[in-house]
Amino acid sequence: MTAPTQTPVWRRACEGHELLDSAAIEVVVEGAVLAIFREQQTLYALDAMCAHQGGPIAKGAVHNGCVTCPWHGWQYELATGKQTIHNQKLLETYPVKEEAGAIWVQI
Ligand code: FES
């Protein structure tokens, strides 16, 4: 017998107008600190603290689909959470959508 799987739930993260294009916001959803980015009309949600020493990912510069941690320059793909130098997923990513004027994450 297999354990029942939990259906992921969409949680409200912020209002849509709080996140402009080419910007990011740090939010706490269900106790998790997330960085949500809106880049060229696409939303991304990933862990907000850098895997190196906890730097604020939402304050990093974005270029070519990657965010650079403002503390020491580790770089992550927004879509996958992979650290680019070692091509290793170090940040968790989450489904994210905009609906009814709000931004929602599945966590
Ligand atoms: S804390 Fe992010 S690169 Fe060091």
Image (cartoon, rainbow, N blue to C red):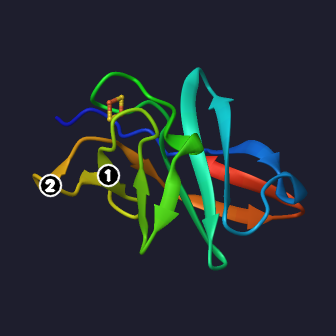
Q: Residue furthest bottom?
A: 40
Q: Which mark is residue 64?
A: none
- Residue at 79% in and 45% down: 14
The residue where tag 1 is placed is 75
In the displayed structure image, the side of residue 17 where residue 7 appears, left or right:
left
Q: Taking 4 as reference, is 15 left or right? A: right
Label 2: element kind = loop
Q: Which mark is residue 85?
A: 2
Q: Residue at x 41, y 42 (%)?
A: 69
Q: Quarter-wise, where is residue 30 in the image?
A: top right
Q: Position of residue 71 (x, y in %)?
A: 41, 32
Q: Position of residue 44 (x, y in %)?
A: 53, 60
User: Hey, what amino acid is under mark 2?
Assistant: Ile
With 87 as the anchor, is 101 left or right in this view?
Answer: right
- Front residue of 83/89: it is 83
Q: Badges 2 and 1: C-beta atoms under 8 Å apart? A: yes
- Near mark 2 (Cα within 10 A), the count class, few <14, some 14-19 or many ≥20, is few
**Three-letter amino acid code at disc 1?**
Gln
Mark sitting earlier along the chain (2/1) = 1
Quarter of image, ligand 1: top left
Identify the residue shown where x is 85% and y is 51%.
18
Image position of 23 with respect to 36: above or below: below
In the depicted structure, whether residue 65 falls above or below residue 59: below
